[in-house]
Image: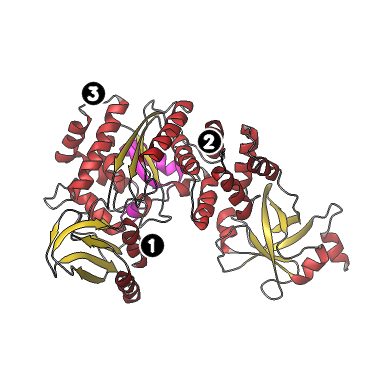
Amino acid sequence: MSSKTKENIQADGEFFLKAKYLDLKTGHPWIVVIHEEDAKTYGVRAGDELTLKWNQKTTQVSVDLTKELVGRGEIGLFQDIITKYHIKEGEVLELALAQPPSSLESIRKKLLDKRLTYEEIRGVISDVVNYNLDDVQIAFFLASAFKKNGFSNEEIYFMTKAMAETGEMLFWERDLVADKHSIGGVPGNRTTPLVVSIVSSLGIYFPKSSSRAITSEAGTADVIEAIAPVELSSVKIKEVVQKTNACLVWGGALKLAPADDRILRVSYELGIEPYSKMIVSIMAKKVAMGATHLVIDLPIGPDLKISSLKDALEVKKIFEYLATKFKIKIKVLIEPLNGPVGRGIGPSLEIRDILKVLEQRPARPLDLEKRALKLAGTLLELTGVTKKGSGEKIALKQLTNGEALKQFKKIIAAQGGKAELTSETIPLGNYSFEVKSPKTGVISHISSRELIRMARLLGSPATKESGVYLNKVIGEAVTEGEALCTLYTNSQQRLDLALNELKKSQLYQIS
């Protein structure tokens, strides 16, 4: 061993390597690469967990070995970890073999159907945020939610509190801060921009953080991003809200409940999400955004996240329990839905629908307008701004007199978007295809799952101009050869993929 190498190893097993940037993404911010010879010197094996320290910060990483990507004395950092932690190239990093995180004992305890204290749950969530737990360990924690006893309401409260407190939290100089959330799973159900515009046009603070798509065709953040920036800092968000009473931003850019992003990814890979986890995810972000009054839109149906009234009522109870604990006034609206809402499925198409409603165009999607008015009216009554029974009437007034449209444009401009936009000027994909009806009849069903899959094959949500326009919706008559829907994309290859899928799917049912 050279004298230089000896100097790099401390008595307690710590060693030092220089950071080297690697122009690769892995999708995992906890993976690093070191040279095989360094691994032999320091007693490190592929897959080992290391504690990485720099500038009084600490995280845990998993090690891969190489002969060529990095040289001796270097540690290769992928773009994921560089973006997350902003470690400078050439910076000397301190490493050591990691001790198992203490939160593993809490996860074991939970798997044995024991109840966890707040401190134990806070430890798990903190280790998730700091990447001290890997995806497999997080999956075991999630799995405990499916066991017979699962998480108690108190544990769900502890988890929500811990998730909110381990991320950024916003505070407002107002006693009334409105919020609204749709459970999701309904294609085109883009009521949020409408509700925010209507309610905030009456002077009510409505700082709305939204999600990006995980399994849907688009999240509200993806849709708004088609016309304005959504990745705003907390300082910029406060500036926008003070100027306009509202914002429409992506919560991920704010680091709201950061543990949720990792847990959500694991849920997606497992293909399952316990209701308790979904509720915690929603409520933690509402607490972090400083909401005082909240309306939950909880649609139920065979293709949706929640399919039965029994499950919906159970979810409603947990929402109400958490709202009481956090002193948030809440109203949960349960409504059966048997298909998509609106006509546009995909970011630009959904923005067109939103603007058609705000502009009060004759050809606007009335089902989207109706749902938005109900949610806005409920929120206005919940806040006490309007009397019980008059909320929808006031909401409709703000829509028909143009105040909601004016407010929407004001918010978009404050966030750095284009203020002068209309439903006719939003661009759509260069490639399009009309899907014709094979027979005459009435549209009896549109598969939400197939519709979402179709939109994603076309490029949504990454390609804003991609998606599906529903020329015909449930209950409408169609004649043979008439257009059922129109596909939009910017790629012939993606259009071919969608058309090939269309041959195998049952997107429309005609009776």
Label 1: state its secondary structure: loop
Report the mark closest to the observer, 1 or 3: 3
Image height of 429 relative to 377, above or below: below
**Residue where numbered disc 2 is placed:** 156
Look at label 1 and name its amino acid: Ala
**Residue under the point 68% across and 45% down:** 104
The answer for how far apart the CA atoms under marks 1 and 2 are is: 33 Å
The answer for how far apart the CA atoms under marks 1 and 3 are is: 42 Å
Name which quarter of the figure residue 500 lies in.
bottom left
Compare marks 1 and 3 and give the one earlier in the sequence: 3
Label 2: state its secondary structure: helix
**As rendered, which of 345 and 300 lies closer to the eye?**
300
Start and end of the magenta stretch?
223-250
**Residue where numbered disc 3 is placed:** 387
Look at label 2 and name its amino acid: Ile
Q: Is residue 321 visible?
A: yes
**Residue where numbered disc 1 is placed:** 462
Q: Residues within 10 Å of mark 3 (few under 14, many from 20)?
A: few
Q: Is residue 393 left or right of residue 5?
A: left
Q: At which x and y percent is residue 429?
A: 27, 67
Compare marks 2 and 3 and give the one earlier in the sequence: 2
Image height of 72 relative to 268, above or below: below
Colour scheme used in the picture?
A: secondary structure
**As rendered, which of 236 and 368 lies closer to the eye?**
368
Q: At which x and y percent is residue 205?
A: 34, 33
Q: Residues within 10 Å of mark 1 (few under 14, many from 20)?
A: some
Compare marks 1 and 2 and give the one earlier in the sequence: 2
